[in-house]
Amino acid sequence: MSYELVFEKLVNFDIDKARISVNVELRLGKDTVNFKANIDTGASFCIFAREYGEKLGISIEEGFLRYFNTTTGNFRAYGHGVTLITEGFAFDSQVFFAADESFQTNVLGRRGWLDRVIIAINDYDGKLYLSRYESE
C-alpha cells in the first residue's frame, strides 16, 4: 500500500550542518524578532533564548514557569503567548524562553509548532516539505 501527501512549501537545508534549521519570526503586538531555530521532534515544546523574548518586550519571569530535564542538563523556562511564523505559516502559540541568559539553543518542538504542521524530511537531498495541518 502506498500513500500520497501534498505539501505547500519546500525548504532546502544544508545537509552538512548537524541540525535542520528554519527561519523563525516571533511577533507580539507590533514587535518582531527573527532568528533560526532547529527542528527537534524530541522536544515537547518550542524553547528559545531569553534575548528573543526580551526583544519583544516580554518580562520573562512573568510567564508560566516550567522546569525542563534533558540529557545535557536541567533548566527553567517561562511560557508566553506569541505569534510564531515559519516559512510563511503563522500560529498563535505558547512558547518558552529560557530563564538563563547563557542558554542559546532555539528549538521548534511538538507543542506549538509540530502539532500545527505536516512535515516530511528528505535528509539525503536536504529537503524539508511543509504544510499547515488542517484537521480532517
Image: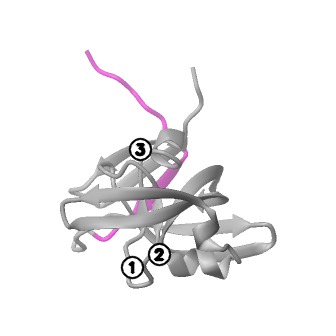
* Rendered residue at 38%/54% (across/down): 128
Give coordinates of residue 40: x percent, y percent.
34, 55
Give coordinates of residue 21: x percent, y percent.
38, 67
Of the image marks 1 and 2, the number of the one nearer the N terminus: 2
Q: Which residues are magenta?
A: 1-14
- As shown in the figure, which amino acid type bears the numbered disc 2? Ala
Where is mark 2, residue-wise?
Answer: 49
Circle on res. 119: 3
Residue toward you, 5 or 133? 133
- As shown in the figure, which amino acid type bears the numbered disc 1? Gln
- Whether the residues at callouts 1 and 2 have beta carbons within 8 Å, the answer is yes
Magenta span has 2?
yes
- As shown in the figure, which amino acid type bears the numbered disc 3? Ile
Cα distance between the residues tagged 2 and 3: 24 Å
Q: Is residue 127 above or below residue 22?
A: above
Q: Is residue 61 left or right of residue 110?
A: right
Where is mark 1, residue-wise?
Answer: 104
- SS for callout 1: loop
Residue toward you, 66 or 33? 66
